[in-house]
Image (cartoon, coloured by chain):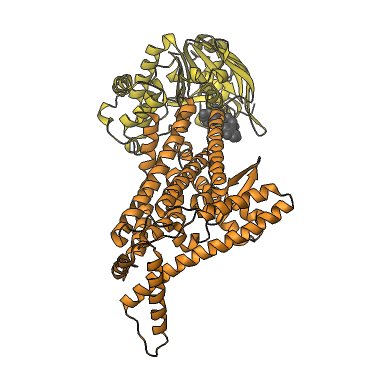
Chain colours: A yellow, B orange
Amino acid sequence: MRVKLEDVTKVFGDKRAVDGVTTELTNGVYGFLGANGSGKTTLMRMLAAVSRPTSGTITLNGEDIGKMGDRYRDMLGYLPQHIGYYKHFTVEKFLAYIASLKGLEKKTAAVKITELIEMVNLTDKRKTKMGKLSGGMKQRVGIAQALLNDPKILIVDEPTAGLDPKERIRFRNLLAAIAKDRIVLLSTHIVSDIEYIAKEILIMKDGRLIEKDTPQNLVHHIERKVWSVNAEEAEVPAYQANYKVGNISRQMDGIQLRIISEEKPAVNAVNVPVNLEDLYLYYFDEEVGA
Amino acid sequence: MSLIKWELVKIFKQKSLYFIGIFLFAWFAYVLFSNTSGTGLTRQVYKEWEGPLTAEKIDRAAKVNEEKSASFEQEEFFPDERFMAEMAVVENIAQSQHIEMRRDEKVQELNSRISAAEAKGNGALADRLELEKQMLNELEMNKIAYYRGPLESVDFVNVFGLMLTGALLLIGLAGIYSNEHSSGVENYILSAKNGRTATMRAKLAAAAIFATVVVLAWELFNLGARAIVYGTSGWDLPIQYSFKYFSSPYSFTFMEYHLIQLAIHLLAAIAFACLIVVVSTLAKSTVVSFFVSGFLFGLPILAESIMDLNVAWVENTLRYTLTNIMKVEGLFMQFKSVSAFGNVVMAPYIGVAAAVVILVLSMILARFLIEKKQIA
Ligand SMILES: Nc1ncnc2c1ncn2[C@@H]1O[C@H](COP(=O)(O)OP(=O)(O)OP(=O)(O)O)[C@@H](O)[C@H]1O
Ligand SMILES: [Mg+2]
């Protein structure tokens, strides 16, 4: 399985929401990072066949996904960023409807629905109306519906938004378990969601795909650019004005700042081990004067 | 469950449908039942005259009519209910004879117009006039019975029936696609294997089923309530007994005409239902969808009230709009026809063809739209 994007562009009026993205996805989990408005949702919609590129092509194993039509959508699982639902449908009924949309046989659907409801830990909410669920529970129903047809291509747009830490871990493990023989594209703002399960990380900025690499390599790029600095409280604003500042923590002997910088920001600065949070900051913290 | 069932569930779960439906039915029931005084007596008097109109019966009716009319010459004459009921029957019989006379005059007139058309070499016009003449010649007003039931049942279609169909289809179907958009379920629909063509097919089928249920529901009410109030006589009388159709050349009984009327109304209603589906697919919200479809429905009525109906092309165009096809009466009240490829095509056929064209175009358009549909 190989999804290929070639010069994929989506234009809204004079806004290039996705701008000439060329890349390739094969089996495994892809983490999709990018600041608000960078074009993740727009790109994922095109992959989920709910929207078409203004220009450029998306192919699956060499065949245009638009031309594949039903055959492509048959392999698809899609969780949109804002989960839609019918307020008056129960969880079970809602999933049965989606199963119908996906063309599942009645019996297969019933088995699959029970299995997935259990998987997302909602067995006791099976007969609850969708409108009465909490945000995180709805999100879990959304995850379940995406998996109903055992999709070969799973596109999940911020699936962990609204999940509590326990459910987030559960979801992460679930993805890791199923990702072997399918393509999973997952967007998020929470780096830890993908840190350990992503085969590769894609980074979007202003509609462009600026990085696509393994987490190790990406971290490696900024190996010597992450610093820890001890400072006086009064110095903090100056650091914030001149550097990308991550974590700020109060220590016994002053304030400790985590700073991303090409050069050593202070004499007492020391390099520290890099994590993906730093990477995010490295690419997306715009509020730096320098 | 099949996709059609799901669509039906979504349509019938809308509570507003029942609020409006019950309100409208209650109103019509009130109008009907509050307007029935004296029907018992009238029915009884008609019973005495009921049956074929023989020459003897016609004469007798004419005499009674004369006597009764004379009574009005007396001073201080206060007719009782029975008197009025009898008066109504004999006048009715006189009227039937009047219709036959008018028919004969009309045939004469047509004869001379046919000759004139032929003289001018206008064969197409002559053919049309000839057809009208033939139809008129088949008309016979040879029966009498109490017919208020069929009369009102037939009239129900173009007023209350039209209102019920229009209102319930708009309420039931305006959101059929736009609700998917506003609820966000559109995301799953458009990305699912059976979400596009198959779902649209299901929506169109569900819309057609819904339209059928709506029409059957009010028809059941229409027939049932009237059978209770007026009984079931009169369905075998010619529709010319209805004032609206007295110059119609179609020799149908009330029963035949009512069935035709329902069939045409239902066809146009299904076409309108599919048109609503198209509008709903294009609309960003159900409110917009509702008003756009409502506007399309009301447009012919609005146009009739602001445009000059004596202009032939306006009248001829408006007759074949969905709303007026649903009214049906405009296709049958007069003889209307056009010549096409050497044949005479009568208004009812044009009406049916127009409804079928709108239906088919709506289905093609709906399918095209759903295949191209994108979430912005
Ligand atoms: N339908 C639309 N019309 C106009 N502009 C749009 C439309 N959809 C998206 N955009 C613009 O395209 C850009 C990319 O939006 P998109 O939703 O893809 O970003 P995102 O990376 O998913 O952001 P977030 O992290 O907030 O979800 C934004 O500037 C947005 O305003
Ligand atoms: Mg987004």
User: Which residue is located at x 42 percent, y 48 percent?
Assistant: B259
Up the image or down, B355 lies above or below B330; here it is above
User: Which residue is located at x 60 percent, y 19 percent?
Assistant: A209
Up the image or down, B131 lies above or below B27; here it is above
Up the image or down, A212 lies above or below B322; here it is above
Closer-to-camera residue (A119/B138): B138
Q: Is residue A32 left or right of residue B4?
A: right
Q: Is residue A109 left or right of residue A16?
A: left
Closer-to-camera residue (A279/A195): A195
Residue A116, picture quadrant = top left
Residue A247 x, y percent position in the rendering = 48, 25
Residue B344 x, y percent position in the rendering = 61, 45
- Is residue B277 at least partly visible in the picture? yes
Residue at the right extreme of this rendering: B120
- Is residue A36 at least partly visible in the picture? no
Residue B325 x, y percent position in the rendering = 52, 49
